Each structure stands twice: as structure tokens, then as C-alpha cells.
Image (tube, rainbow, N blue to C red):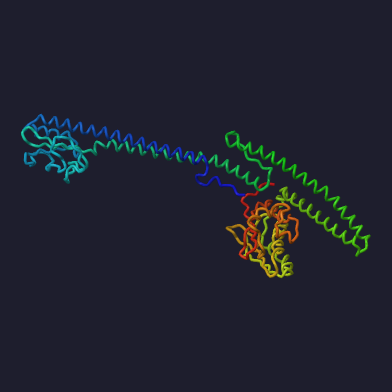
Amino acid sequence: MSLLNPSKGWRSSSSRLLALYSSLFVAWSCILMGVLYYEVSGYLSDLSRHSLMQRQHLFQRFDGEELVEALTTSMTFDMKGVDAYGLFDEQFNPLSGPIRVVPPDLPLDGHIHALANCIDSDDPKLPRDSCDAVATHTGDGRWLILVRENGSLFGVTRIILHALLWAISLTIIPGAAGWHLLRRRPLRRIRGIQASAEAIVAGDLTHRLPLSNRRDELDMLAAIVNAMLDRIEKLMNEVKGVCDNIAHDLRTPLTRLRAQLYRIKQQADEDSPHALQLDEVISETDTLMARFRGLLRISELEDHQRRSGFLVLDPLPLLRELHDFYLPLAEEGEMQLLLETPESLPWITGDRALLFEALANLLSNSIKFTPPGGSVILRAVNDAGSTRIEVLDSGPGIPVAERDSVFQRFYRAEEGNQHGGFGLGLSIVAAIINLHGFKLEVGTSELGGARLVLECRQQLMPEA
């Protein structure tokens, strides 16, 4: 059973909460910036129009040469490229001022209007962008055009906009750094919990979830799970102890019973009915003793005490030995036993004798269920740096509904009843696989029969 990797992107709750908080903060900052920009822009626009209106009313008090003198004097204090004026006669011929052409989009109604393109001129002293303009009819029949560019006054809004953008960026950078640092600690604790959980899933119930000194929600949850594991381990040890004691206690009297039956058979005539009946009873006794030996074998493997003797080994000699060992049995059953391996395989860590026993069980089952004339393949491949061993056959296969049950104790499929067996062979295989931390999958082979895949990828090796 594989657990989710907590380090993948946004799967952790802390990452999502911090990201949500950052998103809300940025969203509200953008809204604040927009409202502030809108308010300041409106205020400066009103201020610009009010200033232009004051200039209009001021210059309306002058006529003739006084108006020209007042306009000329105002140019000394006006900002170049921001404020400009033009004085025209009744036929709109220029008389005075830098503006020599009346803006075509300006209505001659004495009201202030916003123009998208102010003055069509190459003179840098004249405003060319958006501006506010007004056309005033003087008392002596002339026309006075007053213009004020919006861009210079709205420079304040640009300063505010830049300041807000800098503030947001300087907030996002520490926020992102804080998000990264704050999520590391919970994820580190989750990885520690995951490592312990993987060990427990692998069958080592002595492991417990780690606790910190913070006593937060994770520690509360880990303490609850540890209490459950204590109770589960105690109950399983009690059940296991009862089963082991029964197996041990019954093995001795069964051995004595078989010995007594064998002595009685030796005293009976060889061809008498009693001798035949005694043979059947002795055979049933051997069957019972074999089952008890299988149970004790599984119990021994589930103790996880053989991990201390694990070694790093090359799987190729092991596979060749298995092939040579079962080749005569396959030939006797009139079937092919093929070995498909590359020149080299990644080494694996484990107990060679136990791995031989597990693969021998898988291989013997495939040979047993494959009909004469069929084929069995023992294959090994390099799967991204780890060894994958497959056993394929052309037999009847394992139904999908039974693939999770074949590794249970005493389970035998309908097809298996025709071939005998106690239903413990694959249970022993499962115990060996769990002991090594490997993974075993059941599928359908390209030969039409069963496909048993042993993944020798040891992502986690629990301590003994």
C-alpha cells in the first residue's frame, strides 16, 4: 500500500491556506490601489478644471493690450508644455500666444472640455497629450483659448501607483519566502509520520508515529493513532500467540499419533484392508502436520527478525538457479520453461534463501497449473534502476475477483481444488514479500494465463 507524497505541490493544507491568504491579500491590495487611484485621479481632475476655470475668469477682466500683457506675464510663471494659450481674432487668425491653431475638437461654448489630442504641433513647449481646454469670447470680440495638460498633474497619481506597486511587490516577496518557510516544518513532520506509517503498513506494528514538543493538532492526532496501534498490536499478538501455541501444542501429539499409526501398520499384513486404511489415515495426518508447519512458517516470517541478516545480492544467479532447478519438472510436464534476463540487473537487498523460497512457490504454482504443451516464462527486467521479476504462464490464469484473495491463508480457488494444496503457499510468499518491503501484483500475461510481478523497489526499509 503506497501513501500519498505530501511534498507534491499544493496538496498540503498549510500550503493551500498560506496561498489562499496571500491571494486574498494581493486581491484586497489591488482593490485598495484601484480605489485610491480613482479617488486621487478624480480629485486632481477637479483641481485641474477648477484652476483652469480661475484662469478663464481672471483673463476675462482684461481687454485689448491689457489682455495681451496679462497673458504674456502669465507665461513667465506657467509650466512649459503644461499651460498654453492662444489669442485669435473673430476669423480665428492667430494674434498672440504659442497656440496658433484652434483645436478642432474644442467646442466654442465657454465651457471646459477634455480633449484626447490637445495641440497638433511639434513644439515641445505645447501640450500634445490629453488636456482640458476652454474657448472664451472676450469683450472686444476676440477668442481666447486656454489649455492645461492633464499628464503633469496626474504625475502625482503615477507616483502613488508606483508606490503601491512597489509596496505589493515588497509584500509578495516576503510573503512567498514566509510561505515557503512556514510550510517546510509541517511537511517535514508529515514526512516523518509518513515514514513511520509506511513501516506500519509494511507489517511492523512496533513502529509509532513521531511526537514533537509542540503538542499541536498533529501531535494530538499522532497520539490517538499511537494509542490505537498499541491496542491493535496487543490484540494481534494475543491472537498470534494463541495460533502459534495451538500449532506448537498440536504438532507434538500429531507426530506421536503418526508414529503410533506407522507401528500399527508395520504389524498389519501388507495387503490387508486395515493396512490400506492405515495408509489413508497416515496420509491425512501428514497433511495436518504440513499445514501446521506452514502456519508456523508464516508466523516466523511475520516476526520481522530476519531483516538483520539481509545482504545485498545479485538476482541473476538466483534466477538461473531457479530455472535449472525447475526445468526437469517442466520437461516432465511436457511444457517449456524459459528464462529471459538481461546481461545485468540492479542488485537487491534481502535474504537469498527466503527470496528463493518465494520465487520457487510462484514458479511451482505456474508449472502446476499450466497444461501439457504450454509455456512458463521467468523474466527479469531493469525497471528504472530497480529489478522487476515476472512469472508468466499459459494456464487458466487467476480471475480478477480472486486476485486479492489468493494470498490469504487457506484460500484455494476452484481451479486449485483439482490440484490439491493447503492454501498456504502464496500466504508464505506474501509474508516474505512484506518482510522485504517489496510489492507483488497479479495480472494477465501475454500467454493468456497468470502474470505475477515482483517489484523489488525498496523505498523504505523499516528497522528490525
- Residue 88 lies, in percent from the top left, at 8, 39
Identify the residue shown where x is 33% and y is 37%: 34
**Quarter assignment of residue 443:** bottom right
Q: Is residue 24 left or right of residue 66?
A: right
Identify the residue shown where x is 16% and y is 45%: 120
Looking at the picture, tell me which residue is in the foreground, 301 or 329.
329
Looking at the picture, tell me which residue is in the foreground, 215 or 294.
294
In the displayed orientation, state which residue is furthest to the front.
273
Q: Is residue 214 left or right of residue 168?
A: right
Looking at the picture, tell me which residue is in the foreground, 249 or 176.
249
Identify the residue shown where x is 11% and y is 42%: 100
Work out whether 106 lies above or below 414.
above
- Residue 23 lies, in percent from the top left, at 43, 39
- Residue 280 lies, in percent from the top left, at 85, 59
Q: How many marks?
A: 0
Looking at the picture, tell me which residue is in the foreground, 216 or 450.
450
Work out whether 375 lies above or below 107.
below
**Quarter assignment of residue 238:** top right
- Residue 22 lies, in percent from the top left, at 44, 38
